[in-house]
Image: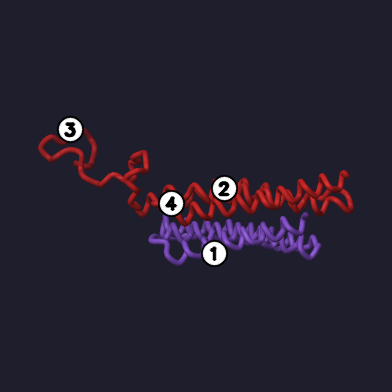
Chain colours: A purple, B red
Amino acid sequence: MIDMALWIALALFCAAVVLNFYRAVVGPSLPDRILAVDTMYMNSIALIVLFGIWVDNKDYFEAALLIAMLGFVSTIAVCKYLLRGDIIE
Amino acid sequence: MLNTVIEGVIAFMLVAGGAFAFIGSLGLTHLKDFYMRLHGPSKTTTLGVGCTLIGSLIYFSQEDGPIVQELLITIFAFITAPVSAHMLAKSALHHKLKPDPRTRGNPVELESEKPKHTIEEAPQGDSPLP
């Protein structure tokens, strides 16, 4: 049962990443692209966790935690740059 | 028996997480303007990733006792998603992105910068602006 659910979830997350990539390429404005990349790293966290279930190894969650923290910080940094023209004032 | 129930819960969590994330990304692709598109990822994708991580947590807790490290990512995602959505909305307002006509609300930041008074009827006071 878990195998079947794993395949369905992997397919859905891959489709989600493809849609995010479309928005990141097409997106008419700069905040759109940032939002698309932000969503893409959230989906990649889930992909890494699903891969960890697939190979039955729970060490992969540390990579997911790293991606979560660095992605949040980079999103905030780029938004700050758009808002103020400077990151650390 | 119990194993079957736990497997069913894990499978449900994984499929629900995938469905939520897919719906969020579909909203990101389909909706009309940025202020609508901000809704999909900031709420739905966070819930999808949270569901997947809870499924993974139950899966790895089966063998040797409960583990809670994966809950860290869930809590972190649920804390940081509103903050990044707020910053993105602020930068969109700063860039004065045009809203769709059907988007409700009329924030002050998007109004065009016409002076409210002409010079003749400027309010008398200590305001430096006419």
Q: Is residue A18 above or below residue B67?
A: below
Q: Position of residue B91 (x, y in %)?
A: 42, 53
Q: Chain of mark 2?
A: B
As measured in the structure, the alpha-carbon distance from the residue carrying label 3 to the one carrying label 4 is 47 Å
Q: Position of residue A80 (x, y in %)?
A: 47, 56
Q: Chain of mark 3?
A: B
Asked if labels 3 and 1 touch by Cβ distance under 8 angstroms, the answer is no
- For the question of whether residue A88 can be seen, the reply is no
Pointer 3 or 2: first along the chain: 2
Q: Circle 4 sits on which residue?
A: B31
Asked if labels 4 and 1 touch by Cβ distance under 8 angstroms, the answer is no
Residue type at numbered disc 3: Gln
The nearer-to-camera label among 3 and 4 is 4
**Disc on res. A18:** 1
Q: Secondary structure at mark 2?
A: helix
As measured in the structure, the alpha-carbon distance from the residue carrying label 1 to the one carrying label 3 is 59 Å
Alpha-carbon neighbours of circle 2 within 10 Å: few (<14), some, or many (≥20)? many
Residue type at numbered disc 1: Val
Residue at image x 43%, y 47%? B36
Residue type at numbered disc 4: Leu
Q: Secondary structure at mark 3?
A: loop
Q: Nearer the viewer, residue B77 or A51?
A: A51
As measured in the structure, the alpha-carbon distance from the residue carrying label 3 to the one carrying label 2 is 51 Å
**Disc on res. B44:** 2
